[in-house]
Image (tube, grey):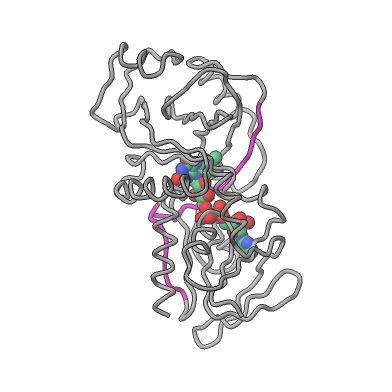
């Protein structure tokens, strides 16, 4: 029996496994790393968007920067240019031309100094290689006796004995434990551009960032748990951003689900004597290092 069992190998489950001081195993519904929900993320951290968790998101930048250096993954600590009032630092046209010579924006932009991007898919791959993940193993039930989880049951019928459990299953937690979660679906558009783009651009509700080889775009967030493509949304992303920056016509699309609590607050709480659930924040990549540590702090007291 593992010291710690984890349900879900998204970024939260992977960081829990990475930071846990002992033997852990992860049960993951999907059949391969490439299918993970956390791969449909933009992997940016823009601290003012984290609201009252701004400082925690800034701490996450340091955490992911260390990860990026350790695993030799492309990452950048950059500014964000935004058309929202998220900073007092309004930049002039000359400054914009200097910072981003390939960007054509006429509206007022503000500069947020401390933002971050990492090639999240690469990070997930590295973390997954170091973890003990059982892919294609969906947990369908938890068996609770005397306020303690004794077993989890897999869709195959197998029963796995549990010492301690962290449920980091994103929107899937709803099927295992009664919890109010709202699914916000988002499209990640992956394209290319031969032009340089240094910072993160937050314009007309879209966010665009250039990684090592690709240009990543997101911006939509609609209450929907289906993984179907909404082509109108994708068209709008492309149309809006191609007005300000040259984009390639070759696109790859991914769809992911943000699992958000009804009050928007992150959830990390003990649900039984030996079990914790963790999820709930819209910017779940940005908060994952903090939530993983909090979940472990609780579990280590058990
Ligand atoms: C398009 C898009 C862009 C985004 N951009 C950003 C961003 O720039 N910055 C940011 O901070 N956040 C961003 N997010 C949000 C962020 O990606 C998520 O909050 C984060 O990935 C959540 O990670 P998680 O590990 O908590 O959950 P998930 O990624 O949902 O992982 C849960 C895992 O558990 C598995 N699972 C569920 N139920 C079971 C079960 N019963 N048995 C076994 N396995 C199970 C699932 O298959 C899944 O792999 C974005 C989201 C989207 C959709």
Quarter of the figure with residue 236:
top right
The chief SS type of the magenta part is strand
Give, as a single range, the part of the protein colored magenta.
251-271
**Which of the image's four quarters has the C terminus?**
bottom left
Q: How far across and how far down the image is residue 83, in percent?
A: 35, 24
Vertical side of 88 occupied by 62: above or below: below
Q: Is residue 136 left or right of residue 8?
A: right
Residue plotted at (44% across, 16% down): 103
Residue plotted at (62% across, 19% down): 248
Q: How far across and how far down the image is residue 270, in percent?
A: 43, 73
Quarter of the figure with residue 200:
top left
Vertical side of 210 occupied by 268: above or below: below
Residue plotted at (67% across, 47% down): 34
Which residue in the rendered view is the most extreme toward the right? 156
Which residue in the rendered view is the most extreme toward the left? 88
**Which of the image's four quarters has the N terminus?**
bottom right
Which residue in the rendered view is the most extreme toward the bottom? 146
Residue plotted at (66% across, 32% down): 252
**Residue 50 forms part of the magenta stretch:** no
Vertical side of 159 occupied by 115: above or below: above
């Amino acid at each position: 029996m593992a010291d710690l069992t984890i349900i879900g190998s998204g970024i939260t489950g992977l960081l829990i496994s990475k930071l846990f001081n002992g033997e852990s195993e992860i049960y993951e519904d999907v059949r391969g790393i490439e299918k993970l929900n956390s791969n449909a993320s933009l992997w940016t951290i823009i601290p003012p968007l984290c609201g009252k968790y701004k400082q925690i998101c800034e701490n996450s930048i340091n955490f992911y920067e260390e990860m990026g250096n350790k695993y030799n993954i492309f990452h950048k600590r950059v500014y964000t240019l935004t058309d929202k009032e998220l900073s007092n630092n309004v930049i002039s046209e000359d400054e914009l031309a200097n910072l981003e010579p390939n960007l054509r924006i006429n509206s007022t932009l503000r500069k947020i100094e401390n933002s971050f991007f990492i090639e999240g898919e690469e990070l997930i791959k590295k973390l997954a290689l170091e973890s003990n993940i059982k892919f294609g193993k969906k947990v369908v039930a938890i068996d609770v006796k005397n306020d303690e989880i004794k077993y989890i049951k897999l869709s195959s019928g197998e029963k796995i004995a549990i010492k301690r459990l962290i449920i980091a299953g994103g929107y899937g937690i709803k099927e295992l434990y009664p919890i109010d979660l709202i699914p916000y679906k988002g499209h990640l558009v992956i394209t290319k551009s031969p032009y340089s783009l240094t910072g993160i651009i937050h314009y007309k509700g879209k966010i665009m960032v250039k990684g090592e080889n690709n240009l990543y775009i997101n911006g939509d967030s609609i209450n929907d748990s289906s993984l179907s493509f909404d082509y109108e949304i994708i068209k709008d992303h492309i149309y809006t951003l191609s007005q300000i920056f040259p984009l390639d016509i070759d696109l790859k699309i991914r769809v992911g689900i943000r699992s958000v609590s009804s009050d928007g607050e992150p959830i990390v709480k003990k649900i039984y004597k030996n079990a914790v659930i963790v999820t709930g924040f819209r910017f779940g990549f940005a908060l994952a290092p903090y939530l993983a540590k909090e979940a472990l702090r609780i579990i280590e007291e058990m």
